[in-house]
Amino acid sequence: RGLTNTVLYLDGVSKTFDGFRAINNLALTLEHGEMRAIIGPNGAGKTTMMDIITGKTKPDEGDVYFDGTTDLTTLDEASIANLGIGRKFQKPTVFESHTVADNIRLALKDERGPWSALFGARNRIAPERIEHILEIVRLIDHHERLAADLSHGQKQWLEIGMLLAQDPKLLLVDEPVAGMTDAETADTARLLREIARDHSVVVVEHDMAFVRDLDCKVTVLHEGSVLAEGTIDAVSSNERVIEVYLGR
Ligand code: ADP
């Protein structure tokens, strides 16, 4: 089962909470290196879908495969994270009392194994790796600042940088631009497009101008299923999508 050229393959996935079908026969395929935006009204099942991918919630039925052949339905959350699936929740969680650079340093996967941190090996992490990540997330000029002193938008970018430090194959990003200024929102789209050049990315977001800026395929969820899929122009002119959003 699954498809070998896909990073993510969901088919026939359903999940019921207390008799309520939050996910209903959901199918979704993400190619390697693809970025996908997931939109849909409140209660559409976006969060539950992300929870199913990361193993936080187990589906009642259906297939969920990572990297073609890895069955995620049989794995726990920690094992799924270790496969290289990184998730960023809506609210930024950074180490406020540490510098920006130290936040990335703390997040970097230690190639010497789990015990090396005890022997100070973390201090030998190549500074170029930290710099490279800080450049991608636009914080290189702020590397010595305390994370606590960053703007809300910068904290979101720092957390995206911390995800990148763990070298994920697939990034799941939950409403990254909520609470950001327009300028930060535009920068976030640019930053995610850059990351998507060598990662697979799923972005859940409400902000339509931002989704347009992501310049990727869009999946519209409604009542736990895919209502429409395509370019932002195609889905936003789709009759059923308009009906769902405007409640006609
Ligand atoms: P979205 O993220 O698109 O707003 P959710 O996935 O959060 O949608 O929710 C889909 C539906 O499932 C909602 O009606 C929500 O109330 C319900 N739901 C989600 N998680 C639970 C849970 N743990 N227990 C009961 N109902 C839940």
Image (cartoon, rainbow, N blue to C red):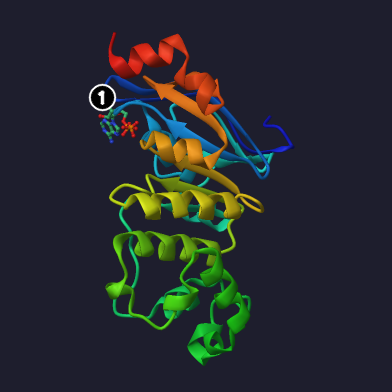
Tell me: residue 106, above or below residue 170. below
Q: Nearer the viewer, residue 219 or 166?
A: 219
Residue sitting at x 36%, y 35%: 206
Residue situated in front as seen by the camera: 199 or 6:
199
Nearer-the-camera pick, 229 or 180:
180
- Tell me the residue at 47%/66% (across/down): 162
Q: Which quadrant of the frame does ligand 1 lie within?
A: top left
Where is residue 37 shown, x and y percent of the image?
Answer: 49, 36
Q: Is 183 located above or below residue 69 in the figure?
A: below
The quarter in which the N terminus is drawn is top right
Residue 12 visible in the picture? no
Residue found 30% across the figure and 27% down from its top: 43
Label 1 sits on residue: 18
Q: Position of residue 196 (x, y in %)?
A: 60, 49
Which quadrant would the C terminus be assigned to in this image?
A: top left
Residue situated furthest right in the rendering: 4
Is residue 18 depicted above or below 68 in this figure? above
Please determine whether, in this image, residue 110 is positioned above or below residue 161: below
Q: Residue furthest bottom?
A: 119
Task: Pick out the residue farthest to the front.
Answer: 183
Q: Amino acid at mark 1?
A: Asp
